Image: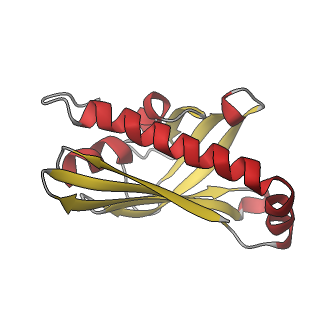
Amino acid sequence: MRDSVTIHMAASPERVWMLVSDITNTGKFSPETFEAEWLDGATGSAVGARFRGHVRRNGRGPVYWTQCKVTASDPGREFAFAVGGPGGRTVNSWRYRFEPSGDGTDVTESFELTDTPILRLYWRLAGKARGRTNAKGMRTTLERIKAVAEVPGQTE
């Protein structure tokens, strides 16, 4: 109930982190979440900051909002958030890690579903297809981030 994708980017870890941790960029990079906005007066990434994402599942639908909470915000190293479900429980966690490598950064995006009986059943029934969709989406997201990160002087 987890997976990850890593792509090398010819940009500094701090530059890539800045792009990823600004959730208002999410719609430019993600094939499913087409917009996101900070909540409760937050204006940037900090542990505990909340935001919501507008999702078009599988790039087609259904369309819905998710509430998320930043769980890691370490400039140039890591950005992570938990996706809330019914009753405010975490259903999924997404993480980006930034490792200096050669001329730039190895960026890893990962997800992990919370281990609950309902999510185990969901994964058993739809996991193979959803896993492929998530892996493809992570690769697409990272490639789109790379296209921006590697352009000198471009911030978004």
The front one of 153 and 127 is 127
Evaluate whether residue 63 shows in this view.
Answer: yes
Q: Nearer the viewer, residue 33 or 39?
A: 33
Q: How is the image coloured?
A: secondary structure
Is 65 in front, or is 34? Answer: 34
The quadrant in which the N terminus is found is: bottom right
For image coordinates 46% across by 39% down, the residue present is: 141
Residue 15's place in the image compared with 29, above or below, is: below
Residue 123: x %, y % from top left? 79, 61
Q: Residue 132, how many percent across, how many down? A: 65, 48
Picture quarter containing residue 72?
bottom left
Q: Is residue 112 visible?
A: no
Residue 136 found in image quarter? top right
- Position above or below: 135 against 140: below
**Residue drawn at x 36%, y 48% as measured from the top left:** 21
- Residue drawn at x 76%, y 56% is 127
Q: Measuring from the top left, give residue 38's x and y in whole percent.
A: 48, 42
State the image quarter where residue 105 is shown: bottom left
Is residue 10 left or right of 136 when viewed as pictured? left
Height in image: 60 above or below 131? above
Q: Split into 4 quadrants, where in the image is the C terminus?
A: top left
Count the labels in the image. Answer: 0
Q: Position of residue 78 (x, y in %)?
A: 34, 62
Relative to 31, say whether 138 is above or below.
below
